[in-house]
Image: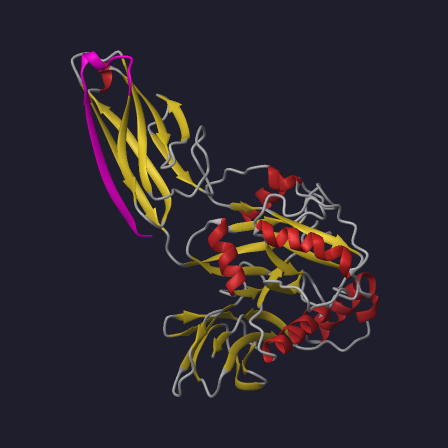
Amino acid sequence: MHEKHLTLRRTFSGEDVKKCFYIDFEVPENVESLRIRHSWHPQAEGNLDFGLVGPDGVQIGASGNVRQEVLISEKYATPGYEQCTPQPGKWQIIVGTDRVGGGITAEYHVTFTFKERRWLKGDTHLHTVNSDGKYTPEELIEKARRKKLDFIIITDHNNCVAAHTPHNLPDLLVMKGVELTSFLGHINFWGVERPFTAPYCVNSFEDFLPIYEQARKSGAVISINHPECKNCGWHLPRDGFHYDCVEVWNGPQRIDNMAAVQWWHSRLLAGEKLAAVGGSDYHRDYVVTDLLALPTTFVCAESCTSADILDALRSGHAFISSGVNGPRLYLTCGCAIQGDSVPFTPGLKVRLTAERLLRGDRLVVYENDRVVHHHKAARDGSYSTDILVAEKGFIRAEILTDYGPIRSAAYHTVTRFRLPADAKLPIPPMARCISNPIYFD
């Protein structure tokens, strides 16, 4: 990742004992994290207190003389300091001197790590003991860390308790969310500590709209969950209000998810630019299962911050995979990636790269309502191809697998208990990876 370094020095004399001073420095634009290491020479002559003030004049934190290194980011901040994305402008180091002898020189080595577009993996739909999940937020977070996820969104049913608790972790961003849950459908609100204050009692579209409007005004990113689920699908209107995303893949792959993909595809054909997401809807494991981050949503974001990850989800800069180690789909057209819109001109091509394919996987590429490319993997590995853009609309891709006799029998055994309506239905090709489209206007 791109970094910039800055060194500041200040010499203190005996007259400066037991006084505080400010040392100014500028934080540039687009910084994701700020790290400051400080030392003084000769060290044996005294101690230096350390504090930090942001560009709005508000103190970010302080640590006395017990820390020689401080890190500030949204995901993690050194104890004693506020988590935040470093804003551009004039910052100040607070320094206090103590027991200075014949003079002491302080050095501050500042490192700015800049935002840089990259692929991050996460789970957008999780439950804890604050609703009907098995695990506390802390236990769930530890599971996500072991999965090496970059971000998670905790979305307990109808309450925001988990969103009020900050989590200070160097390797995992824990984002705010809530799942508004009713007998008429489930919908996620992401990124806001409390997107609605009204009671969650929804018995009609008229009951739903005031809650939705409050969440929208609060800035929440909105995703309809598992719309085609036979147990708890979306039974409210799908028109008449705006939503940013639709959860086409909920939990282990099943017929309902593939029906959701078909419905989403129909909205794309109607000219709607609607982002597809996935979420494990994780509550607990059963015997030998490992359901967290199944599926995993990969997003291409400018940084591992809530704002940039939510922007990537909303924009469709994402694909959904069967897990953290599942297959991957990357679509590019010049500098554009999935979710972007490109002015149509004859001769445009989409570069498609599929990674972590398994033998027998089928890569299918759609241009609007047509399959324009098909590839069956003869071996495990990767595959790339160029797709000529023939017309306005969109191009997207899926990696599909066909269930053999053993997997079909296992699927029907599970659905007999969990989804009886599916127990005797024929199993369609199931997606192992789904990309969002590139649009051509």
Residue 260, picture quadrant: bottom right
Between 399 and 69, the residue placed more toward the observer is 69
- Is residue 259 depicted above or below 117 in this figure? below
| Left or right for 420, reference 27 | right
Q: Residue furthest left?
A: 102
Between 108 and 218, the residue placed more toward the observer is 218
Count of marks overlaid on the render: 0
The location of residue 122, given as percent across then percent down, is 54, 55
| Left or right for 371, reference 75 | right
- Is residue 100 depicted above or below 209 in this figure? above
- Is residue 375 depicted above or below 50 in this figure? below
The location of residue 295, given as percent across then percent down, is 61, 61
The location of residue 427, given as percent across then percent down, is 73, 76
- Residue at (49%, 58%) from the top-left corner? 311
- Residue at (53%, 70%) from the top-left corner? 436
Magenta segment includes 221:
no
Q: How does the figure colour the protein chain or chains?
A: secondary structure
Asked if residue 289 shows in the view, the reply is no
| Left or right for 280, reference 358 | right
| Left or right for 55, reference 173 | left
- Residue at (36%, 31%) from the top-left corner? 53
Magenta segment includes 5:
yes
User: Magenta span covers which residues?
Assistant: 1-20
Asked if residue 102 shows in the view, the reply is yes
The location of residue 419, given as percent across then percent down, is 80, 64
- Residue at (66%, 64%) from the top-left corner? 241
